[in-house]
Image (cartoon, coloured by chain):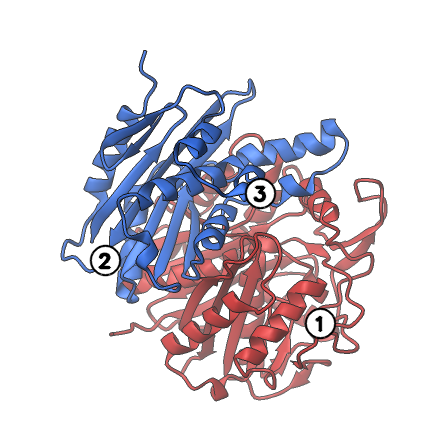
Chain colours: A blue, B red
Amino acid sequence: MKVLASCFLSPFAAVLNGTVKFQFQDDNWLKECYHKLMLDYPKFYKMDDLSKMAILSVELLKENAYLNNFNKDELELIFANSNASQHTDVKFIDSYTNIGNPSPSLFVYTLPNILTGELAIKHKWYGENTFLIASKFDTQLFENKLKHAQMKGAKHCLCGWVDSKVEKNGTLTQESFLFLVALNEENSTISEELEALFKKYKYLSTEKV
Amino acid sequence: MMKNNVYFSYGTFVSPIGIGVDQNFEALKEGNSGIQAHPSSGFNNENWFFAQLNNLEGNRYDSLLKTALNDLKVNYSSSILSSSKTLFILSSTKGNIYNLPEDVFASSRIIIQQETGNSNELIIVSNACISGVIALNTATDFLRYSDYETVIVIGIDVISDFVLYGFQSLYALSDQPVQPFDKDRKGISLGEACGIIVATKEKPTSFSVEYLGGASSNDANHISGPSRTGEGLYRAINKTIERAAIDKSSIDFISAHGTGTLYNDEMESIAFNRCDLQSIPINSLKGFYGHTLGAAGIIETIVSMLSIEHQLLIENKGFNELGTTHSLNIVTKTQQQPVKTVLKTASGFGGGNAVLLIQAAV
């Protein structure tokens, strides 16, 4: 298996295949990224932050990877994070405890796998989907899932670690790491490469003082 | 491709109608539903119906998980549970939801490790209402392609104001007990439960079924509404049958999702007809247990195993008259019938669909 392309988004920068693509100035960095990518997808504004990060990450990846060439059933999606939908969960609780009514438009985003649904809708991907929760970015978990996909005949997997957490004081911790993997290569392990990419991209996309 | 056999056996089953698999089976045979009226439970004090456990103390999620694990320990030795060759998979949509805004999955990791002595990293599947079926498919992958002997799959979700108010806000709750596939169906009744299935490479000495195959597919259509063509479910069923390498005429029974909403049940009828499975006996168990979200795929697979073991199809509780535009062969009363091969399906938010096939072990 082999990483064909990878990208990382944080509130400070977007990294594509090892190079810093944009740096963000705006507090609303997701909107800024949407404009920088010249995306025209009005549904974007209705989404929660997890889905927005996933949508933007795929747009970024598309610049260098042939994501449009897959048949509709071919691409398997393997996504994970640490905080599930905690960020939207907190907003939904606020809608009925403080604002007055439970908000249906927030409730539908109180599941982490909605982001894979949004990706499937935008790109018409009907393939297999899994969403997993891990206490931290877990390269072994991805490697296991990739190996299973390979054994079952999949050729390519789009993997992602997309996480958003809100602290009690309102501080957000957000990151989105996507990587496209070809399964027909000989190399049977990928975790070291993923660990190195994740660390490097995290460093590249940290706020520069 | 070489396929190693995988077997499912009962772990345990804790629900409002029984503690343990046997009690649940007795309640199903007697037609006892766990769904009851809960006055003033709604956001504006509406009277909603749901299936709630009434003996959970303290944190209700943690209490349910501990109850289920204690029952599991009655039937499985600590040497199996704690083995490095044993993996635990948790299927849950919201985990310990009462712990928000803190980590809703932290307590599961601690409780499972403490109760079983197993120190492998817990695998957590959180894939909305298809979590349970995805978790069982994932368990099989870990047995076939990774170095484990036993994978223990726990499906669990509890009722909370959060989830009740959420479904209320979507106008998805029925003001009567749920009536899956019926012409008068008005929406879902929520439920809570914990089911555990033990998947192994070795055929166990106790009753087991053989796993034949499974798959998932996305509708690529809408995040909270089912596809009008049943696209994802149709694709997932076809892929499952292809992977299992069986003739679909050998399927004896379908354990459907059947949430009781207008659109979901209609979508399922379209998908089953597109797959030409409409004459196979089919039920939804939501009339007994309500919609138990992350537990649903597990507990409904357990009941499918009971159907195979006892050659008994369980009625689709709440059903009087078919209310889908495409025909289905609903099991209207509990009846003895030869059952060897069962198709289990699930569909959920995010456009996900997941399917698996099991068969009497020989």
Identify the residue at image location x=24%, y=37%: A17
Image quadrant holding the N terminus of chain B, namely bottom left
Identify the residue at image location x=75%, y=54%: B173
Amino acid of disc 2: Leu
**Label 3 SS:** loop
Give the left or right position of residue A174, taking residue B17 as reference: left
Amino acid of disc 3: Tyr
- In this picture, is B240 found above or below B191? below
Which of B6/A167 is in front? A167
Circle 1 is placed at which residue position? B181
Tell me how far mark 1 sits from mark 3, CA to CA: 27 Å
Give the left or right position of residue B3, taking residue B316 as reference: left
Image quadrant holding the C terminus of chain B, namely bottom left
Badge 2: few (under 14), some or many (20 or more) residues near its Cα, within 10 Å?
many
Residue A82 percent location from the top left of the image: 43, 37
Amino acid of disc 1: Phe
Badge 1: few (under 14), some or many (20 or more) residues near its Cα, within 10 Å?
many
Residue A145 seen in the current view: no
Which of B116/A29 is in front? A29
Residue A43 percent location from the top left of the image: 55, 43
Q: Mark 2 lies on which chain?
A: A
Residue A24's label in the rendered image is none
Tell me how far mark 3 sits from mark 2, CA to CA: 31 Å
Residue A109's label in the rendered image is 3
